[in-house]
Image (cartoon, rainbow, N blue to C red):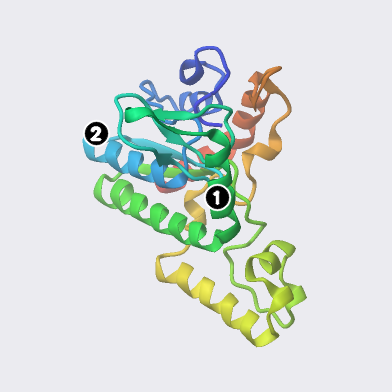
Amino acid sequence: MTKGHGLPDTINNPRLWVNQLLRSVDCTAITNLSQTGRNNHWIFLETIGALIRQEYDIVIVGWSAIPRFNFNVGLELYSTMTNLVNSGASINLNNYTSYDSRWLASLGDQLRRMHNDHWDFLDLIKYVNTLIEIQEQNRKGHIFFVNTLGPWPANYFVKQDIVLPNNLSKFEQDLLGVDTRDDEEIFKLYDMIHAQYQLFGGIRESNWLNLYEPIHRLQIDNAAPDDKHPGLLTQDLLFNFMKLKFKQKLGNKC
């Protein structure tokens, strides 16, 4: 969604939405470090590494899907990273060791069954506030976040006064497992997750361009018949969707 996967010249395509967005505020040098298929942990660490190596006036971080696993198998001179989905290719290692893609996908399915999105949301809050501290407080630059594939519903990170479990959204009900808990436990869990969010600084909505409007929902075309990443018409649409709020937020932070 941020690299321009499937587009001609990918990160260098002039119609890639992030390139259009940064040129609209006269950025002359644009560095795009995004990679296809990475998870939020990878994105956070790579952004930290980039901020340590170099200073940037404006940083835009496009967060990925939740959950998404990245796992390096063994140690080789070539890439052995897997997303633990059925990619159709096995991973072959030294000493004739091989991991079949179906087995890796089965492992991923088991992890996803045990997974609860709350913990990824809490990690995301930690990532966001750490990057803000580095870029805005230490570097005196700007940083903005983009929701590309986030699953949370509108106003999820705003604690509500709930009276009954059905006051919660369907997403929150599933997250808290309301069908198998009594009301008291549901309310305690709800209070717990929001207390944890606030403990680590909250989601900082003012630094997001589209916290509750994931850009994947705006996609109107594909990069190619066999590539479901956003095409050029979607790139233009995303730029127009982002440009006004980006300039407003950038102006408010100057």
Query: What is the C-alpha distance between the residues marked 1 and 2?
Result: 30 Å
The kind of residue tagged 1 is Pro
How many other residues sit within 10 Å of disc 2, few (<14), some (14-19) or many (≥20)? Answer: few
Q: Give the residue furthest to the right.
A: 166
Which residue type carries mark 2?
A: Gln
Q: Is 35 or 110 nearer to us in this picture?
A: 110
Quadrant of res 32: top left
The correct choice, above or below, for 156 with respect to 96 in the image is: below
The quarter of the rendered structure image containing the N terminus is: top right
The residue positioned farthest toward the left in the image shown: 53
Where is residue 160? Give x, y as percent: 64, 74
Residue 33, position in %: x, y?
A: 39, 29
Quarter where residue 6 is shown:
top right
Q: Which mark is residue 87?
A: none
In the rendered view, tell whether residue 112 sits above or below residue 248: below
User: Which residue corresponds to the image point at 45% horizontal and 46% vertical from the top-left?
Assistant: 40
**Quadrant of the drawing holding the C terminus:** top left
With 130 as the anchor, is 86 left or right in this view? Answer: right
